[in-house]
Image: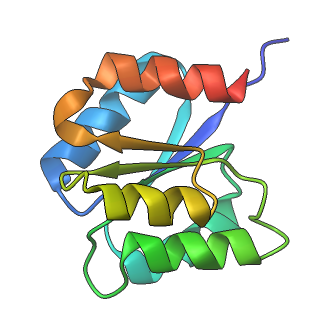
Amino acid sequence: MIKKFKVLIVEDDSALREMYEERFKKEKMDVVTCESGENAIDMALREMPNIILLDLFLPKKGGLAILEVLKSQPATRNIPVVVLTAYPREEYREKSMRNGAKLFLSKSDIVPLDLVEKVKEILS
């Protein structure tokens, strides 16, 4: 039996969120989405995804703050987090990796199909 993975996409841009969701569903993955930072932690705790795709700049609570909380809680500590950002500054990369991100990617440098492949690599 093939294990079906669940991906949580935390992204406030609806076009990007829908594009990522569609791509992961084509790969037969379960997808849950969240558009705000304030709901991301509750969603992660409720859904217990296999991996989280996390935007850095979100309304009300930013991705770095979410990442810190996720990595500090026993229930979510071991869920790999891939940070996706439109602002790939080195300071954000360093903070993301230091706070436990598995990968830090620039949205402009990766197409959805390549993102799916990177997620598969992390989950395998």
- When the figure is inspected, residue 5 is found, relative to residue 26, above or below; the finding is below
Q: Position of residue 60 (x, y in %)?
A: 30, 88
Q: Does residue 55 appear left or right of residue 95 in this picture?
A: left
Q: How many marks?
A: 0
Q: Position of residue 58 (x, y in %)?
A: 28, 73
Residue 51 shows in the view: yes
Q: Nearer the viewer, residue 45 or 108?
A: 108
- When the figure is inspected, residue 61 is found, relative to residue 29, above or below; the finding is below
Say which quarter of the image contains residue 59: bottom left
Q: Does residue 2 appear left or right of residue 70 in this picture?
A: right
Q: Nearer the viewer, residue 55 or 48?
A: 55
Q: Residue at x 85, y 11 (%)?
A: 1
Q: Residue at x 22, y 30 (%)?
A: 109
Q: Does residue 77 appear left or right of residue 98 in this picture?
A: right
Q: Position of residue 25 (x, y in %)?
A: 44, 26
Residue 55 shows in the view: no
For the view shown, which residue lies furthest in the bottom direction? 60
Quadrant (top left, top right, bottom left, bottom right) of the C terminus: top right
- When the figure is inspected, residue 56 is found, relative to residue 59, above or below; the finding is above
Q: Residue at x 77, y 64 (%)?
A: 77
Q: Position of residue 46 (x, y in %)?
A: 68, 68
- When the figure is inspected, residue 5 is found, relative to residue 102, above or below; the finding is above
Colour scheme of the rendered structure? rainbow
Say which quarter of the image contains residue 72: bottom right
Q: Nearer the viewer, residue 18 or 113?
A: 113
